[in-house]
Amino acid sequence: MQNLTPRWSALVLAGLFTASSALAADKAASEKNDPAKMAEMMKKADAAGSPGEPHKALQSLVGEWQAEVKVYVSPDGPPIVSRGNSKKDWAPG
């Protein structure tokens, strides 16, 4: 007669692993739907999206701009001139 102990041990371990995985997934799903945790995540997202130090470096790009581009088609001919205006502002938040 064969020794069934290793097979039973493997079967029990597989069952425990499956059960613990299901419990962990259920816990993660319940935490995801928790209104208090959702409010905390939204508060952190708002703080992360608020203007901060890196935006100060971009402030110099805000304003009205005029551009003039000259394209020389031939070395001895006159350039083709194109002009444009642009207004840059912060996106509404």
Image (cartoon, helix red, strand yellow):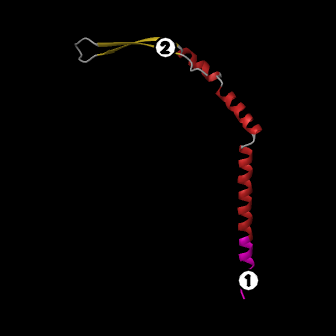
Above or below residue 24? Residue 55 is above
Magenta extent: 1-11
Of the numbered discs 1 and 2, the one sitting upstream in the chain is: 1
- At horizontal 74% and vertical 75% (from top left) the residue drawn is 8
- At horizontal 71% and vertical 62% (from top left) the residue drawn is 18
Q: Which residue is mark 1?
A: 3
- At horizontal 25% and vertical 18% (from top left) the residue drawn is 73
Question: Which structural element holds mark 1?
Answer: loop
Q: Position of residue 49 (x, y in %)?
A: 64, 27
Q: Which residue is mark 2?
A: 87
Quadrant for the C terminus in the image: top right
Name the quadrant containing residue 75.
Answer: top left
Q: Using the image, tell me which numbered label, if any, was put on residue 66.
A: none
The amino acid type of the residue labelled 1 equals Asn
User: Are there few (<14), some (14-19), or many (20+) residues within 10 Å of tag 1?
Assistant: few
User: Nearer the viewer's eye, disc 1 or disc 2?
Assistant: 2
Q: Position of residue 80 (x, y in %)?
A: 29, 14
Task: Confirm whether the magenta stretch covers residue 10.
Answer: yes
